[in-house]
Amino acid sequence: MNEEILLYQIALTLVPGIGDVLGKKLVTYCGSAEAVFKEKKKLLEKVPRIGEKILDAMSDKSILERAEKELAFLDKFRITTLFFLDKDYPFRLKNCIDSPVLLYYKGTADMNISRIIAVVGTRNATEYGRSVCHRIISDLAQDKVMIISGLAYGIDSCAHHSALENNLETIGVLGHGLGMIYPNQNKKLAEKMMKNGGLLTEFMNDSIPDRENFPRRNRIIAGISDAILVVEAADKGGALITAEIGNSYNRDVFAIPGRINDIYSEGTNRLIRKNMASLVQSAEDIRYLMGWEEKGKKPDGFQKKIFLEMTEDEKVLVDYLNINGPSGIDDISNLCRLTMSRTSACLLNLEFEGIVKSLPGKIYALT
């Protein structure tokens, strides 16, 4: 990564008033983060929601000075950045409107693998909750699922430990920067995770775990996953926020039922009662609901025959997905130069033929 390019990508996230949505719009309008800072003021004024305060803030020299300090930290500790236009940026998250402009990552895992489950729950996990969490993750090992959680006490820590014990990659999404680990007791766990998974955050290295950071952290957990499993939760808390965000992102949400008089089952039972989550009791339930059961092999020559029977537009879509991997329908339509209605019709037909599969968030991929 060119350091000057990265410098401006970091700087863009530091400008007061420029959030994730506006930041991405500016990059799209100008062509790059660097171009945003070097664009003429008169042209930037035409962008909706850009006012004098934001334009003045962009000219503040301290923005680039702070970005240079962050860049030095990244170099020193070999931390990877993921800009929202980068190929390695999590494609599931990219298609969420409020996804971060820039992510900081330390680890070894590919966050664009085919199966990712978020496992969340209370910090005050009971023996029942820990047992169920461990059993389900152990049983999911055969599916080569990546486990995402928030590296907090309780269910989060249990999920990460269980994933590592079963040789599954696991990512901890942090509500602070990579200059620290919170809670401190999870330092050894975090070190293990960076060798078989990693740590991910949108916060700069010196950011502390302020309360307002955690809802933002939770949207990343929900957005990066195919589904969210809530193991135990009280009537209020971060796990329920993650589940609600997951529903808004069109993710599958699952919940473990509990006894009606258990405080840490109130949240999960309510999710099920209000049809905000599907009741699951085992890995097999998740496997069934996600459609992960092993399907019979297609006979030799099947794909070749199907390819010959495709229309020219369908062949264009298949070639695109073969090269670019899972993609949002908007990107497919724009880059294949097909109308949205034609793209939808072709994708539907390819899905019927078993060539394309639909993923959460209007993402499509080859089977």
Image (spheres, grey):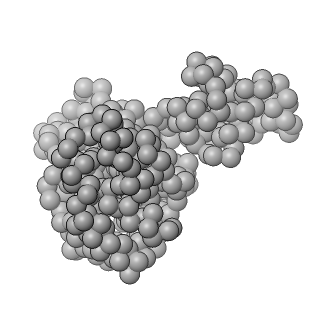
Going 84% across and 35% down the picture, which residue do you hit? 304
Q: Is residue 99 visible?
A: no
User: Residue 201 location, x and y as percent?
Assistant: 33, 60
Nearer-the-camera pick, 84 or 5 = 5
Task: Say left or right for 120 vs 347.
Answer: left
The x, y position of residue 228, in whole percent, is 36, 43
Q: How many marks?
A: 0
Residue 251 drawn above or below residue 100: above
Q: Is residue 254 left or right of residue 355?
A: left
Taking the image as drawn, is residue 26 in sight? Answer: yes
Q: Is residue 336 left or right of residue 185?
A: right
| Quadrant occupied by the C terminus | top right
Q: Position of residue 224 (x, y in %)?
A: 41, 48
Whether 124 is drawn above or below 364: the answer is: below
Q: In the rendered view, tell whether residue 246 sits above or below residue 82.
A: above
Asked where in the image residue 25 lies, by quadrant, the reply is top left
In the image, what residue occupies the spot 72% across and 33% down? 316
**Residue 165 screen position, x and y as percent:** 44, 67
The answer to which of 325 and 231 lies nearer the viewer is: 325
At a point 16% along the width and 52% down the height, the residue shown is 212
**Residue appearing at x 35%, y 61% in the figure:** 10
Quadrant of the rendered image containing residue 255: top left
